[in-house]
Image (cartoon, rainbow, N blue to C red):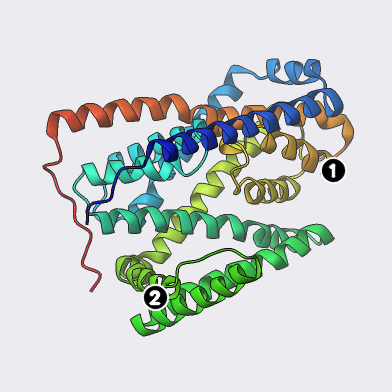
């Protein structure tokens, strides 16, 4: 069945929505930056901390950032059998750069287009994109739990962190249970889809929202399709994907830790367990894309969390470290992503879509 193109009215509505989202994001960014650098820290302190970095420290940051970028493609490779590292790197950088500029799931759209141009079927591509999202989400949810474990190992406690960790642990276990039920059998997957559809319709009726009469059947079909498309990877490669996702988060934390030490904050002032706890909280906080890649929100959160863990006198250095961290973990991805996009578009024009990489049969 041919899907009709969107009407002019629908296109105008979508344009207005995108403009509203971008304006809201810019408003949030401006407000956060204003509060950050007028109420919490002074620009002079930040500038002094950044200018104090030596050439060796800049090179160390660049090296740690390069290692992290080398690690990131491993999750894509684990979630997409037969995908080689060079293409995995390109399909990480270009979508990540897109998501840094445009709100919404723009990275998924770009990655989908790349995979399709390399000969992957729509089902294979959808499965890979969805699994990468799920594994990353699980990794971020697990971070507060790990942070509490680190705190307990050092004989510390933090009531707020422990409360969040309990919630995160429940969400993590619930997600794992959901995945288990979806993959157990097609019958179970369909039953779960129908149950979710029934609950959604009931909630929608309470809120006086209309839903399709076939919602339960549609969700049952989608659950079965999800099982068919992702079963092989989840059964055979989850350990690889989980390890890759954990390594990616470790790489980001390493950049943050080196950034904090580079601006002159010693371990006696702010040790790594406290830094890791703040990292876990910010990663979870920025999972919701309020602004592109958490711009403004992440920097303010690091200053707030790490100042609370240390002393107010460190606010300027912490803000400088947060900016340096974002430079090497986020800003650097944008030009590299642009280069990756140019390489992909050029190679696609030259070779077309003649080469086909196939995922193993889900069986």
- Identify the residue shown where x is 40% and y is 60%: 240
211 or 72: nearer the viewer: 211
Q: Residues within 10 Å of mark 1 (few under 14, many from 20)?
A: some
Q: Residues within 10 Å of mark 2 (few under 14, many from 20)?
A: some
Whether residue 287 is visible here, answered yes or no, is yes
Q: Is residue 234 left or right of residue 166?
A: left
Q: Is residue 167 left or right of residue 245?
A: right
Q: CA distance from mark 2 to mark 1?
A: 50 Å
- Sooner in the amino-acid sequence: mark 2 or mark 1: 2
272 or 138: nearer the viewer: 138
- Dividing the picture into quadrants, the one containing residue 263 is top right
**Would you name the residue on which mark 1 appears?**
308
- Identify the residue shown where x is 57% and y is 37%: 293
Instruction: Residue at the far left: name it.
Output: 354
User: Which disc, if any, is residue 41?
Assistant: none
Q: Position of residue 346 (x, y in %)?
A: 22, 26
- Identify the residue shown where x is 33% and y is 43%: 88
Q: Position of residue 184 (x, y in %)?
A: 39, 81
**Would you name the residue on which mark 2 appears?**
217
Q: How many marks?
A: 2
165 or 183: nearer the viewer: 183
Q: Quadrant of the N terminus?
A: bottom left
């Amino acid at each position: 069945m041919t899907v009709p193109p969107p009407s002019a009215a629908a296109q105008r509505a979508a344009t207005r929505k995108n403009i509203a989202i971008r304006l809201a994001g810019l408003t949030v960014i401006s407000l956060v930056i204003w509060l950050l650098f007028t109420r919490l820290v002074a620009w002079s302190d930040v500038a002094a901390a950044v200018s104090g970095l030596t050439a060796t420290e800049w090179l160390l940051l660049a090296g740690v950032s390069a290692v992290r970028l080398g690690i990131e493609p491993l999750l894509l490779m684990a979630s997409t059998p037969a995908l080689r590292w060079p293409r995995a790197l390109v399909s990480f950088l270009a979508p990540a750069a897109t998501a840094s500029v445009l709100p919404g799931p723009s990275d998924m759209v770009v990655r989908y287009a790349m995979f399709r141009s390399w000969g992957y079927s729509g089902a294979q591509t959808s499965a890979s994109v969805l699994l990468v999202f799920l594994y990353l989400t699980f990794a971020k949810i697990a971070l507060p739990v790990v942070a509490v474990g680190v705190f307990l190992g050092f004989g510390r406690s933090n009531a707020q962190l422990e409360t969040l960790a309990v919630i995160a642990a429940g969400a993590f276990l619930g997600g794992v249970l959901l995945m288990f039920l979806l993959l157990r059998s097609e019958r179970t997957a369909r039953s779960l889809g129908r149950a979710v559809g029934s609950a959604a319709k009931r909630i929608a009726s309470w809120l006086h929202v209309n839903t399709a009469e076939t919602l339960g059947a549609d969700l049952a079909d989608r659950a079965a399709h999800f099982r068919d498309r992702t079963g092989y990877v989840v059964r055979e490669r989850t350990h690889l994907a989980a390890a890759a996702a954990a390594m990616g988060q470790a790489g980001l934390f390493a950049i943050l830790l080196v950034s904090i030490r580079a601006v002159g904050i010693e371990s006696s002032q702010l040790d790594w367990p406290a830094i890791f706890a703040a990292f876990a909280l910010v990663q979870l906080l920025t999972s919701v894309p309020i602004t592109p890649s958490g711009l403004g929100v992440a920097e303010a959160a690091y200053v707030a969390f790490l100042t609370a863990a240390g002393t107010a006198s460190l606010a300027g250095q912490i803000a400088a470290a947060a900016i340096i961290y974002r430079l090497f973990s986020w800003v650097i991805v944008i030009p590299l992503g642009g280069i990756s996009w140019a390489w992909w578009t050029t190679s696609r024009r030259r070779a077309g879509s003649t080469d086909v990489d196939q995922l193993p049969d889900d069986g």
